[in-house]
Amino acid sequence: MLHNLLKRYLHALETTVQALEEVHVERYEEEVLSFSRTNVRIRVRFRSGHLLELNEAVIVKVNQIVHLGYRYHFQDEQHHLVFRYDDTPHFSDLPTFPHHKHLAETVLATSKPNILDVIKEANELAR
């Protein structure tokens, strides 16, 4: 059994991935650890050769989805980084620490993005 918030969250995620066109879902894994906790690992290959990898640990606390950790990595067909959002605790000088976004040649301060928005961003860039 899974908490209703997690069920809805995972359903929205799965629906969004399934709606992508001209992609191959190489991996889609929902690892249910308990009633209120799950890990998600997704790997999507776009027709263009771009690759999107989504990894996150999610828990329900006080009737809210809380992310314990995340990494959203997107690279081009030459395996070069396009972007990566993560909360690895480096770049402590950024005002959004530990959240940040890697681009090919820089790191930007950013809040944790919504995973569905990351999928949309990658899908637009892969076209």
Image (tube, grey):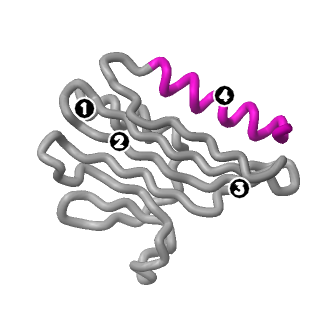
Q: Answer above or below: position of 120 versus 37.
A: above
Please tell me whether mark 4 or mark 1 is closer to you in this view. 4
For marks 4 and 1, the one nearer the N-term is 4
Quadrant assignment for the N terminus: top right
Q: Badge 1: how crowded within 10 Å, few (<14), some, or many (20+)?
A: many
Q: Identify residue for label 3.
A: 66
Q: CA distance from mark 3 to mark 4?
A: 16 Å
Q: Amino acid at mark 1?
A: Ala
Q: Identify residue for label 4.
A: 11
For marks 3 and 4, the one nearer the N-term is 4
Please tell me whether mark 2 or mark 3 is closer to you in this view. 2
Quick check: 40 left or right of 117? right
Tell which of 123 and 35 is nearer to you: 35
* Span shown in magenta: 1-19
Q: Answer above or below: position of 122 versus 32.
A: above
For marks 1 and 2, the one nearer the N-term is 2
Q: Amino acid at mark 2?
A: Leu
